[in-house]
Image (cartoon, rainbow, N blue to C red):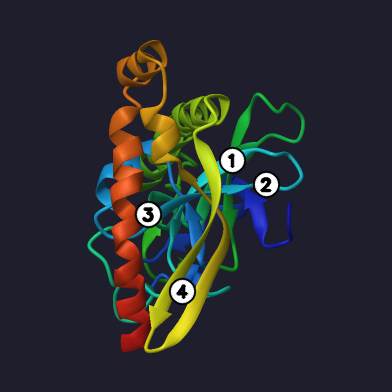
Amino acid sequence: MTASIRTLSYENHNQIKIKHSNDYQHAKDQQVVPLIVHEFARASAEMPIVFVKNSETGEFQAVALLGLSQNENLFYSEKKWLSPYLPALISHHPFALIPSQNDENQLQMVLKEDSHLVSKTDGDLLFDDEGNETEYLTKRKNSLGNYFESNHVTKAFIKQLSDKSLLSQQNLSLDLNGEKIAINGVYLVDEKALNSLSDEDFLELRKKGYLAPIYSHLSSLHQLSRLAKLKSEK
């Protein structure tokens, strides 16, 4: 755990407030942001959804593509987020849930203390004078808990895609004002492999509710043109 990230507690954070802001500067350099499967339907209408592979663990992760080059977020603006949809992980900042150092099965809520949203003068308090969680903190904690649970569903969904050999590595290419932009190392659902599944395997995907997010992912690839548009406008 870094020096700026500390376990949330009354002792450490009884004077801390969290400001309300539409400036998501903590995400301004994020080219990709992880998504849970429950976000696919809404996110797919705004941004491309692709899969990336951890070179060390071999595990796949679903992400929204926010930029066309490293450390670029084309949806970020100091004045407002340039999309009707804001990925959940960005909205949870400056909080996160991580496994406890003493017990990986136990989760602890942490706060990024150097966040631009952390204040001692403006915003919502985290604890009252008696050391109890405020209603604001309880809502934030519940939201994080729901996200963590949904992440388990997402992992099961992605594992199914991997087990059925439905993810294939692709190199995407865009033409932006005569300049070729390449996006390498992403994985997409292979439509040919999907359509070649046995009736039994295809029915299994349908019964588990996995077809809808698969098709949301595939349709989201049309949003690459939106990224190109945003880049040309910037």
The residue that label 4 is drawn on is 25
Disc 2/disc 3 C-alpha distance (Å): 21 Å
* Residue 182 versus residue 193 in the image, above or below: below
The residue that label 3 is drawn on is 87
Q: Which mark is residue 54?
A: 2
**Image x and y of residue 98, in percent:** 62, 40
Disc 4/disc 1 C-alpha distance (Å): 27 Å
Categorize mark 4 by other alpha carbons within 10 Å: few (<14), some (14-19), many (20+).
some
Q: Inspect the image, locate mark 2, and give the three-letter code of the amino acid beneath it.
A: Asn
Between marks 4 and 2 in the image, the one whose residue lies nearer the viewer = 2
Q: Inspect the image, locate mark 4, and give the three-letter code of the amino acid beneath it.
A: Gln
Secondary structure at numbered mark 2: loop
**Image x and y of residue 154, in percent:** 46, 33
Q: Which mark is residue 60?
A: 1
Disc 4/disc 3 C-alpha distance (Å): 14 Å
Between marks 4 and 1 in the image, the one whose residue lies nearer the viewer = 1
Q: Earlier in the sequence, mark 3 or mark 1?
A: 1
The quarter of the picture where residue 84 lies is: bottom left
The quarter of the picture where residue 19 lies is: bottom left
Between marks 3 and 1 in the image, the one whose residue lies nearer the viewer = 1
Disc 3/disc 1 C-alpha distance (Å): 18 Å
